[in-house]
Image (cartoon, rainbow, N blue to C red):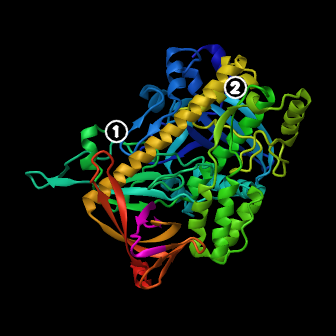
Amino acid sequence: MPIEEKAQRLDLRHICVCSVDPPGCKDIDDALSLEVLEDGNYRVGVHIADVTYFLKEGTPLDDEASERCTTVYLVERRTDMLPALLTTDLCSLVGGQDRLAFSVLWVMTPKGEILSSSFHKSFIHSRAALTYAEAQNMIDDPSDRSELSENLRRLLSLSKVIREKRMQAGALQLASPDVQIIRETITEENDNGSERKKKKKEKESGDVVKTEEKEGDEDEEGMLAVGKRKYNMKKKKRGEEEEREDQMKECHADEVTEEASGGDIALYQARDTNRMVEDFMLLANTTVAEKIVNYFPTASLLRRHPEPKERQLKALKDLLQSRGISHFDFSSSKTLGASLNYVAQTAPDLDFLVRILTTRCMNQAVYFSSADILPNSQSERHSITTSLSSSSSSPDKPEVSPYFHHYGLAAPIYTHFTSPIRRYADVVVHRMLAAAIGIEGVPSLCRNKQRLTQQCELLNVKHRNAQIAGRNSVQYHVYLYFKHKGSREAVGTVTKVKKNGVMVYIHKYGLEGIVFLKEQEFIFDAEKQALKHRESGDLLKIFDALLVRIEADHSNDFRPEVTMKYIRKATEQDRER
């Protein structure tokens, strides 16, 4: 590394830095640190892999990354945006190694009040690459008084304060079933009686979507897609379950059917440490967004989340009122959040499902250039950027601009900074931030507004395509599961009534599908939004519990799918089994 490069970096190798990720994670984007200052305050750091040191603007490698835009995660494999030499070695913030980072540092009080923030290209040395489970165990173990454990406890405490402030500002807590495929390691005996693995099944695995940054903004649709679905690959070994959330398995196509068919499906339960990482990543993204838009008010790459679909929220409100839930105010994100909390208190059995249905009413978050939606008036632009500068991470900061607002996070301004290994948007933002703090020149995208707009449009297209690919991969592997296991009976909840059937959500598996009903047996009652059985008079309504049979349907070789068949309205005995 050139001497000039070393001179402009802040050496943080002496402080206690650690990463918290899923087991087996090799492309470690981020790490956390906390130092107790002499005055009792904390210096908290989010350290992000400095990808742009290796990925120079305008090189063939950068051109390819700008076209790929994102890493694509499927259940069995992933297609990286960058070469493995960068993603899992040179850029990855692995434990026990010196690494280059781009650090966001805050001075905070123990009560979570942000006193100042700063940005630095840095050196770090991660003390440990922890899993979510390992970090949680360290926090929960009262006998562990190590520096790392104490810092993790402080970080968790601060993250809860940060989250609460975000909720008070109107950020939404929407539901998304995190589904796991739990798979057993297949073994067979050798001639000497010892066991050996018949197939190497645990090469790499993980979530289709990383858990750090849940924006509450994804408009997921489709037969078996509900909210932000994550498939977590696990194996059972010596009574331990190993989480797999971020790295996808890498295998050949002819291995997919056989290897994906075993195991079980369950819902993933996030730990406090998952939420802790998420909170600090969101804070870093917001802090960086404020910095770059102040420096590049007409040439920043940002991310906004438009207000939700009012017509669909109105339909959901009418639906809830028909079931006796009268309080559902969606005039703002804050009132919507309060309404969801009201449902949780008055109808706890419907809480999770109502949050899922609310997620369906959300629009998609998008990348955009600040030049594209800023007002033409220079005075208005100045007013916006001045307001942003003066608000400076205050918990009571006003809504500074409707142009940049992120509805789901209740953030006046937002961007993506924390995952440059897998998202090109973050690479661009790293370059903008480096220019904003005066250590690098202005990126070419900032000098060419048309190119920046085109890049944002491509980012949105590729991001959406990656979501669709991941969702289709999930659907296929769910099909493989039921094909291997055979049909299963499960209790589901009606989420929508149609003339020819009902949409049913199966909480046990985190799946949703349509249950077709014969017109000869059921009559559609449009006024009551119900299906009435012609003989018994029984009504099938929204939120009713049904017993259904789930099975794999391979009648269409080109599009195998999972189907659901109606058995009966669920009894108490059905619910309990």
Q: Is residue 558 left or right of residue 374?
A: left
Query: Which picture quadrant has residue 543?
Result: bottom right
Dot 1 falls on a residue whose secondary structure is loop
Q: Is residue 158 left or right of residue 504?
A: right
Q: Residues within 10 Å of mark 1 (few under 14, many from 20)?
A: some
- Magenta highlight range: 502-523
Residue 325 lies, in percent from the top left, at 67, 75
Closer to the camera in the image, 38 or 276: 276
**Image position of 408 with respect to 66: above or below:** below
- Give the amino acid at mark 2: Met
Whole-number angstrom distance, CA of label 2 to CA of label 1: 34 Å
**Image position of 502 with respect to 442: above or below:** below
> For mark 2, what is the residue?
432
Q: Residue at x 19, y 48 (%)?
A: 198
Would residue 506 be counted in the magenta stretch? yes
Residue 467 lies, in percent from the top left, at 50, 42
Furthest-right residue in view?
379
> For mark 1, what is the residue?
250
Would residue 278 be counted in the magenta stretch? no
Q: Earlier in the sequence, mark 2 or mark 1?
A: 1
Q: Is residue 338 left or right of residue 188?
A: right
Q: Is residue 253 left or right of residue 305?
A: left
Closer to the camera in the image, 294 or 307: 307
- Give the amino acid at mark 1: Glu
Q: Residues within 10 Å of mark 2 (few under 14, many from 20)?
A: many
**Image position of 61 with respect to 404: above or below:** above
Residue 67 lies, in percent from the top left, at 52, 24
Give the quadrant of the N terminus.
top right
Residue 176 lies, in percent from the top left, at 54, 57
